[in-house]
Amino acid sequence: MGKREAAHKLLTEKLLTAAILRVEKSGLEHLRARDITNDAGCALGTLYKCYADLDDLIIHVNSKTLGLMKKALGDAGTDVADPVEALKALAIAYLDFAVENKNLWSAVFKHRLHEGQSTPEWHRMENMALLDLIAKPMSAINTDLDEQQLQVRSRTYFAAVHGIVSISLQDRFISLSGDVLRSELEHFVERLAN
Amino acid sequence: MGKREAAHKLLTEKLLTAAILRVEKSGLEHLRARDITNDAGCALGTLYKCYADLDDLIIHVNSKTLGLMKKALGDAGTDVADPVEALKALAIAYLDFAVENKNLWSAVFKHRLHEGQSTPEWHRMENMALLDLIAKPMSAINTDLDEQQLQVRSRTYFAAVHGIVSISLQDRFISLSGDVLRSELEHFVERLAN
DNA sequence: GAATTAAATGAACAATGTTCATGAATTGAA
DNA sequence: TTCAATTCATGAACATTGTTCATTTAATTC
């Protein structure tokens, strides 16, 4: 790899970490192209040499977050034998991840592409991969479902848990204390899975 | 009421309906101050005489939407005797409302105030009012819960249904056909409420 | 080491929310 | 009715953005 290519790659990386730090600290809505390039120590235009546009960079930020999330959920769910307990552990792990990485986590779900553009396939796949973690314990509970139905059911349950966690981290309704929220989630999964 | 006050009130109204039409047609993300004032037939600055800023106007748009939503859910849930069926009817009505008023509905949940500002109390109350519709059939099922717990549980269930509907109207995961989605929702409520 | 090529640069542009001095129109008293 | 006082709509101007592109700078090639 020549000096040119190496420098470009380094810059691309620097921009990504700068963006991640910014989103982590201040949230997606305060992310500014000029801040990122300042942090990365390069010119404004450089961002558009390394990424198609801000959206593209944000997708890469979210990709990293999904990686972290998948790791966190994987750690939580793997060695729990009882499928219902495994699902509970996954739900709680999801909640914990969201709380501990609030800005990164919400960036994943807040970000919307502009009209006409659509999420790249590789990023869609990263999203879908989350469901695979749920599918295994799920299949142990619902033995009557085929592959296809299991996928759909996993999606439904993930969406439900996501909704509960999501609404809690807004100020739309009364906010629940951490403990109440956790026990609501556990009750919820118990009810759903038994 | 003098001519002055009347004109001001009329303009305030015109701006609101213009904003509603714009959101309805193109979504919150394409709402522009200049478009609204053009539609309403007034100058740009006028918007800031009638509303504090765009956020304030959007909150009023969302307030109208919540009114429509409450009406739609009220119509669906009232005269269903069986509480589980009532909850199902509410969930389906929520889905239908979201589908039929996609842009208005998503505006309610997409809109976030800027740092430092917080949702006005009257608008928070409008949000909370949704939960009251769920609370009645809910109390028939969970007779052991007190007022406080019932409120919390209603919130949890609403959030779950909202999550399912919400994820379906994004392109994050594979999209479900209308029928599959409906039956997933019904299965879901059944499982949760029995 | 010179010529070629490619990439970083940052000034300039377009779009957008918001403000404010100005002017026009309503109001209320003479 | 008339005329000053007042109030409110006006839209030009500003600040902040994302994005582009001609220019400069540096690496690559022969």
Image (spheres, coloured by chain):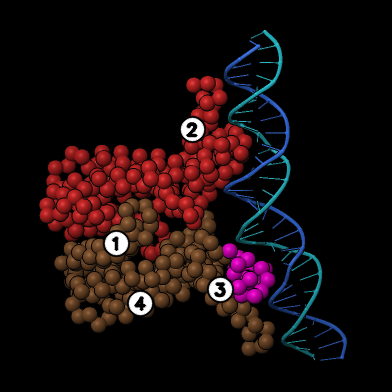
Chain colours: A brown, B red, C blue, D cyan
Rendered position, A180 above or below B30: below
Of badges 3 and 1, nearer the viewer stands 1
Q: Are marks 2 and 3 on the same chain?
A: no
Task: Name the residue carrying label 4.
Answer: A72
Identity, as a three-letter code, of the amino acid under mark 3: Ala
Chain to which the residue tagged by mark 1 belongs: A
Of badges 1 and 4, nearer the viewer stands 1
Within-10-Å neighbours for mark 3: few <14, some 14–19, many 20+: many
Residue B71 pos. (x, y %): 30, 38
Residue at left 40%, top 39%? B64
Q: Bounds of the magenta span?
A: A32-52
Chain to which the residue tagged by mark 2 belongs: B
Which numbered tag is attached to residue A177? 1
In this rendered view, identify the residue nearer to me: B81 or A1.
B81
Residue D1 pos. (x, y %): 67, 8
In this rendered view, identify the residue nearer to me: B53 or D22.
B53
Separation of disc 3 and disc 1 at Cα? 33 Å
In this rendered view, identify the residue nearer to me: B173 or A4.
A4
Q: Are marks 1 and 4 on the same chain?
A: yes
In the image, D22: left or right of B15?
A: right
Rendered position, A116 above or below A2: above
Within-10-Å neighbours for mark 2: few <14, some 14–19, many 20+: some
Within-10-Å neighbours for mark 1: few <14, some 14–19, many 20+: few
Q: Are marks 2 and 1 on the same chain?
A: no
Of badges 2 and 1, nearer the viewer stands 1
Chain to which the residue tagged by mark 4 belongs: A
Determine contact: label 1, label 4, CB under 8 Å: no
Identity, as a three-letter code, of the amino acid under mark 4: Ala
Asked which quadrant contains residue D21, the reply is: bottom right
Task: Name the residue carrying label 3.
Answer: A18
Separation of disc 4 and disc 2 at Cα? 50 Å
Task: Name the residue carrying label 2.
Answer: B13
